Image (cartoon, rainbow, N blue to C red):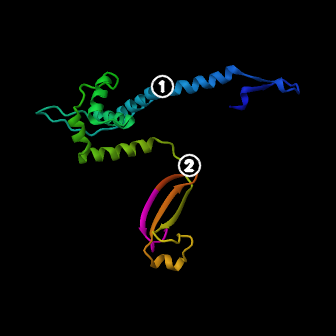
């Protein structure tokens, strides 16, 4: 409970602390508003990113018109948000056609085919770079370390350094952001590979 909820009236008795219910309820209302609007805020973010992302889609002059890549991006992000199957994603997107301003909703088979295509993998990489470039820049503190694993009775710490290199240990190297304890990168190697 936050400290500013309690107001001190200046006396020295136990009952001098009065609970400020208005500020407590305000905080609860703010939390409830975020929790109630969590899905709506996620949908707004998806729509915003889909509108701002630069697509390089080429439209054919003949045949069936291709599905808009903006529509596919929105569908895949909704699928990821709710952990849906392709059929469930199709039904969900039919409900959200007006919200995402789509001309037509792609079939589940189209979603499945597009998700497996090399073109879409390239687009996902571009979208990831687009998201990363929009995040605020900061100076992280990164630490690296390694540890070994084996099926032996003696652990990595108990084994002599000279023996670690000659035996069949598996070593994992990790780069971790110190502030958030976020794993930035890791690599599994033989035991004779140095941290550098």
- Residue 66 at what x, y percent from top left? 19, 34
In the displayed structure, would residue 77 be above or below residue 143?
above
Pick out the residue farthest to the top. Answer: 22
Residue pointed to by mark 2 = 180
Query: Closer to the N terminus: mark 1 or mark 2?
Result: 1
At 49% from the left edge and 24% from the top edge, which residue is drawn?
A: 36
Name the residue furthest left: 62
Where is residue 51, by image quadrant? top left
Above or below, comparing residue 90 to residue 182 in the picture: above
Residue 166, position in %: x, y?
Answer: 45, 79
Locate the N terminus and report the quarter of the image it occupies. top right
Measuring 67% from the left and 23% from the top, which residue is drawn there? 23
| Magenta stretch bounds | 185-196
Question: Quick check: 121 left or right of 146?
Answer: left
User: In the figure, is residue 172 to the left or right of 66?
Assistant: right
Q: Position of residue 149 (x, y in %)?
A: 47, 67
Is residue 188 on the magenta stretch?
yes
Q: Nearer the viewer, residue 102 or 149?
A: 149
Disc 1 on helix, strand or loop?
loop
């Amino acid at each position: 409970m936050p400290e500013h909820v309690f107001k001190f009236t200046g006396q020295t008795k136990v009952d001098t602390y009065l609970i400020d219910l208005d500020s407590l309820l305000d905080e609860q209302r703010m939390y409830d508003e975020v929790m109630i609007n969590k899905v709506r805020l996620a949908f707004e973010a998806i729509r915003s990113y889909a509108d701002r992302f630069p697509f390089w889609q080429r439209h054919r002059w003949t045949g069936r018109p291709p599905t808009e890549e903006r529509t596919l991006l929105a569908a895949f992000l909704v699928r990821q948000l709710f952990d849906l199957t392709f059929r469930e994603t199709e039904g969900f997107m039919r409900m959200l056609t007006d919200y995402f301003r789509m001309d037509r909703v792609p079939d589940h088979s189209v979603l499945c085919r597009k998700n497996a295509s090399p073109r879409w993998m390239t687009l996902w990489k571009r979208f990831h770079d687009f998201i990363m470039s929009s995040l605020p820049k900061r100076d992280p503190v990164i630490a690296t370390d390694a540890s070994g694993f084996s099926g032996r009775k003696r652990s990595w710490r108990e084994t002599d350094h000279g023996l670690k290199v000659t035996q069949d240990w598996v070593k994992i190297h990790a780069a971790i952001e110190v502030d958030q304890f976020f794993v930035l990168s890791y690599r599994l190697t033989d035991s004779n590979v140095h941290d550098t």
